[in-house]
Amino acid sequence: MANFTVESVLKYYNNKVILNDIYISLSKGEILCIVGKNGAGKTTLLNIISGIDKNSQKHITYNGKILQKRFFQHISYSSQDIYIPDNFKVRKLHKYFKTNNTKDLFNESIFIEKSKYLFGELSTGERKYIQSLLNINSTRKICLLDEPFGYISPIYAERLIHYIKSNKETKIFIITTHLFQILSELDLKTALLKDGKLHKINDISKFNLHY
């Protein structure tokens, strides 16, 4: 039985259908990778699932219960926008985010090397990396990652994969990315978002990069 379902998602913009009858069904330990062209609606879909976009039709359940006003308590979301305040000190970020593996996480080199910095003093890649790290390791059981590998170094991408692996058995992940080859070592489901619908990809190794 699926722990998490998203169904009947419908989104219009200027009388144009952006998302139409989207259906997602995932259980604990599963990862869904969503690919698609820019403008296909990947970010819009994650915004709807996370509750940021409230002007849409959707039906979301988790562990058999309909998620309504308080469903954000179950979901962590690292969007493409960096939302951690610039004036937060890197060494104190652990006070604002409840995480698993807290000791190991905050022994990551970036937290040690940049401990005296304000978050806003870091590069875009460093801020994106930290925001993704905190969400992947969040105590919340559903993790949404929107293009987490954009603007970050290959070393940082490897560390994100490491933490996705270490959290996989207890969480559900939905990841959008153009760089899906990075996820090749993970056991995951893959779907193409095209023409407002999700299309299952059975063999990602044979997938047409031009969609």
Image (cartoon, rainbow, N blue to C red):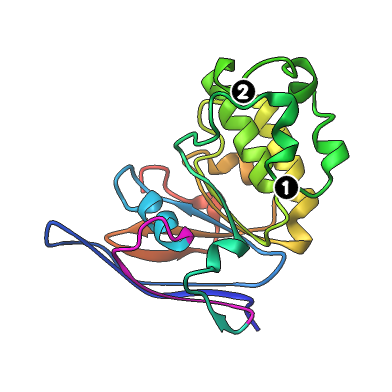
Asked if 18 appears above or below 85 in the picture, the reply is below
Q: Is residue 185 visible?
A: no
User: Percent from the top left, x then y, of residue 78?
Assistant: 54, 44
Which amino acid does the dot numbered 2 rest on?
A: Ser
Quadrant in the picture for residue 170: bottom right
Quarter of image, res 25: bottom right
**Residue on which disc 1 sits:** 137
Q: Which residues are magenta?
A: 50-63
- All told, the count of numbered labels is 2
Q: Position of residue 96 (x, y in %)?
A: 68, 41
- Residue under the point 55% across and 58% down: 203
Q: Which mark is residue 93?
A: none
Residue underneath mark 2: 153
Does 26 lie within the magenta span? Answer: no
- Between disc 1 and disc 2, whose residue precedes? 1
In this view, the residue farthest toward the right is 103
